[in-house]
C-alpha cells in the first residue's frame, strides 16, 4: 500500500469523524426558541384567577362580536348563546361590542367578573349593535 493511499484513507476517516461530530452537535443543541424561553399559548387554557372576565353573548340568529382589552379586541362570530374567557387582567378595562347579522328577538351581552355580572346591555332592534365599556 502506497503512502498516498494511506493519506487518502486517513483524510477520509477524519472527514467522516467531522461529519459525525457536526451531526451530533447540531442535534444535541436546544432550539433557538428553547434558549430564549419562548412560551407558546394558543389561548385555549385560561384560569379564572388570572383572567377573571368572561363575556356572555345571547342572541337568536347569527352575530359578530369584538371583546377584550380595548387596545387588543378579539373577534368572534357565532349564533345562539356563547361564553368566552377574556384575556384581561383584573385591572384591565374591558370592552364588548356585538352586532346581529340575522334573526329577531333580543341580542344581549353580559360581562362577568369572577362569575358575577358587572355590566350588561341589550337591544331588540333588527341588526343594531350593542356594547359595554367596563372601566376597572
Image (tube, grey):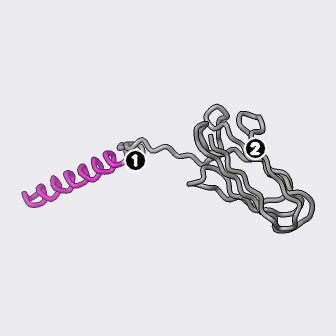
Q: Residue at x 76, y 34 (%)?
A: 115
Please tell me which residue is depicted at 49% across the width and 43% down the height of the picture: 39
What label does residue 119 carry, if any? 2
Quadrant for residue 15, please give it.
bottom left
Depicted 50 relative to depicted 67: above or below: above
- Going by the image, does 95 lie left or right of 62? left
For the point 65% across and 41% down, which residue is it?
Answer: 45
Which span is picked out in magenta?
1-26
Q: Nearer the viewer, residue 15 or 59?
A: 59
**Cα distance, mark 1 to mark 2?**
46 Å
Residue furthest to the left in view is 3
- Spot occupied by residue 83 in the image (x, y as percentages of width and height): 77, 47
The picture places residue 93, in percent across and down from the top left corner, at: 61, 45
Q: Which label sits in the foreground, 1 or 2?
A: 2
Pick whichever of labels 1 and 2 is earlier in the sequence. 1
**Residue position for label 1:** 31
- For the C terminus, the image quarter is top right
Front residue of 38/121: it is 121
Residue 22: x %, y % from top left: 28, 50
Residue depicted at x 77% and y 58%: 130
> Residue 10, image x and y in percent?
15, 52
- Disc 1 crowd, CA 10 A, few/some/many (<14, 14-19, 20+): few
Amino acid at each position: 500500500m502506497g503512502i498516498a493511499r494511506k493519506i487518502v484513507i486517513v483524510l477520509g476517516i477524519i472527514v467522516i469523524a467531522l461529519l459525525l461530530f457536526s451531526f451530533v452537535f447540531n442535534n444535541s443543541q436546544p432550539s433557538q426558541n428553547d434558549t430564549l424561553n419562548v412560551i407558546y399559548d394558543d389561548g385555549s387554557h385560561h384560569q379564572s384567577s388570572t383572567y377573571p372576565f368572561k363575556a356572555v353573548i345571547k342572541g337568536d340568529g347569527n352575530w359578530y362580536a369584538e371583546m377584550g382589552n380595548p387596545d387588543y379586541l378579539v373577534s368572534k362570530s357565532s349564533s345562539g348563546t356563547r361564553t368566552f374567557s377574556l384575556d384581561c387582567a383584573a385591572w384591565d378595562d374591558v370592552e364588548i361590542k356585538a352586532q346581529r347579522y340575522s334573526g329577531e328577538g333580543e341580542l344581549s351581552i353580559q360581562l362577568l367578573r369572577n362569575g358575577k355580572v358587572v355590566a350588561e346591555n341589550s337591544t331588540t332592534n333588527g341588526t343594531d349593535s350593542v356594547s359595554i365599556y367596563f372601566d376597572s
